[in-house]
C-alpha cells in the first residue's frame, strides 16, 4: 500500500485496536449495569424477607454505588452517528455555504459530530481516541479536517452528521442568517472548558 503519509498504516492498526477495545468496554459497561440491577433486586428481596435491614445497607450501598460509578466513568461511552447511507443524503446546509465561510469561519465545524459505522468502515476520518467516535478536534476546538481557509478537507467523505446539519436556524452560529450576522461567541464553540 503506497501512501503519502508514512504513519497511515500504523494509525489504521491503532484505530482497529481501539475500536476493538471500545466495543469490549461498551460490553463491560452493559454487563456491569445489568449485574448491578440484579444485585439491587437481590438486596430488595432480602429486605422484603426480613433477612437484612435497610439501615445495615446504607453505608455499604453508598460505597458500592460510588465504586460502580467510578468504574463506569473510566469506560468511555461510544457515540455513533446516524445509521443511514450518507451518500444518499441531500446536503442540508445553505447553498451559499462557501461564500459565507469568511464570515462564519466554518463555525459548524466546531460542533461535535459523531462518526457512523459507515464512516468507521471506510476509514480516513480522524476521531478522538478519548471520546469515541467523535470527529477529532484541534486544541482550539476546530475539526481536524478543516483547512486554514475553514473548508472541509474530506468533503467527499463527509460524515452523515455534517451532511444533514443546517446552520440557518442555529442561534449559536447566526444572530441573523439573512443579514449575515454571526453570533459574537461563535469562536467559543467547541473549545475545551
Image (cartoon, rainbow, N blue to C red):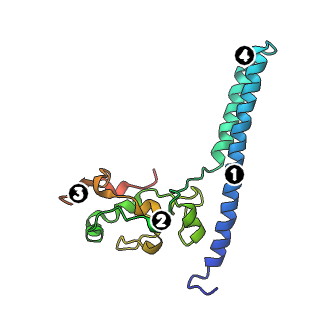
Of circles 4 and 2, which is in front? 2
Q: Report crowding for label 4: few under 14, some 14 to 19, many 20 or more residues within 10 A (C-alpha).
A: some
- For label 3, the residue is 177
* Residue sitting at x 42%, y 72%: 155
Left or right of residue 147: residue 32? right
Compute the Cα span from label 3 to label 1. Answer: 42 Å
N-term-proximal mark, 2 vs 1: 1
Residue farthest front in this picture: 88
Above or below: residue 40 compared with residue 76: above
- Alpha carbon of mark 4 to alpha carbon of mark 2: how far? 53 Å
Q: Residues within 10 Å of mark 3 (few under 14, many from 20)?
A: some
Local SS, label 1: helix
The mark nearer the N terminus, 3 or 1, is 1
- Circle 1 packing at 10 Å, graded few (<14), some (14-19), many (20+), is some
Mark identifier at residue 86:
2
In this view of the protein, can residue 139 be seen by the observer?
no
Element marked by disc 3: loop
Q: Name the residue under label 1.
A: 25
Question: Are the two marked residues, 2 and 3, in contact with CB atoms closer than 8 angstroms?
Answer: no
Give the residue at mark 4.
54
Q: In this view, does 154 lie to the left or right of 179?
A: right
Amino acid at each position: 500500500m503506497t501512501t503519502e503519509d508514512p504513519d497511515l498504516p500504523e494509525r489504521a492498526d491503532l484505530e482497529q485496536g481501539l475500536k476493538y477495545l471500545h466495543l469490549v468496554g461498551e460490553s463491560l459497561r452493559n454487563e456491569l449495569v445489568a449485574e448491578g440491577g440484579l444485585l439491587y433486586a437481590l438486596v430488595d428481596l432480602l429486605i422484603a424477607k426480613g433477612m437484612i435491614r435497610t439501615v445495615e445497607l446504607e453505608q455499604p450501598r453508598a460505597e458500592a454505588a460510588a465504586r460502580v460509578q467510578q468504574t463506569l466513568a473510566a469506560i468511555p461511552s461510544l457515540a455513533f452517528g446516524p445509521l443511514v447511507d450518507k451518500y444518499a443524503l441531500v446536503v442540508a446546509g445553505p447553498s451559499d455555504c462557501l461564500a459565507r465561510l469568511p464570515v462564519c469561519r466554518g463555525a459548524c465545524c466546531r460542533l461535535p459530530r459523531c462518526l457512523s459505522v459507515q464512516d468507521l468502515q471506510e476509514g480516513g476520518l480522524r476521531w478522538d481516541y478519548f471520546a469515541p467516535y467523535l470527529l477529532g478536534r484541534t486544541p482550539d476546538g476546530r475539526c481536524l479536517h478543516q483547512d486554514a481557509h475553514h473548508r472541509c478537507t474530506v468533503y467527499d467523505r463527509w460524515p452523515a452528521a455534517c451532511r444533514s446539519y443546517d446552520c440557518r436556524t442555529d442561534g449559536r452560529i447566526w444572530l441573523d442568517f439573512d443579514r449575515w450576522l454571526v453570533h459574537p461567541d461563535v469562536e467559543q464553540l467547541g473549545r475545551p472548558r
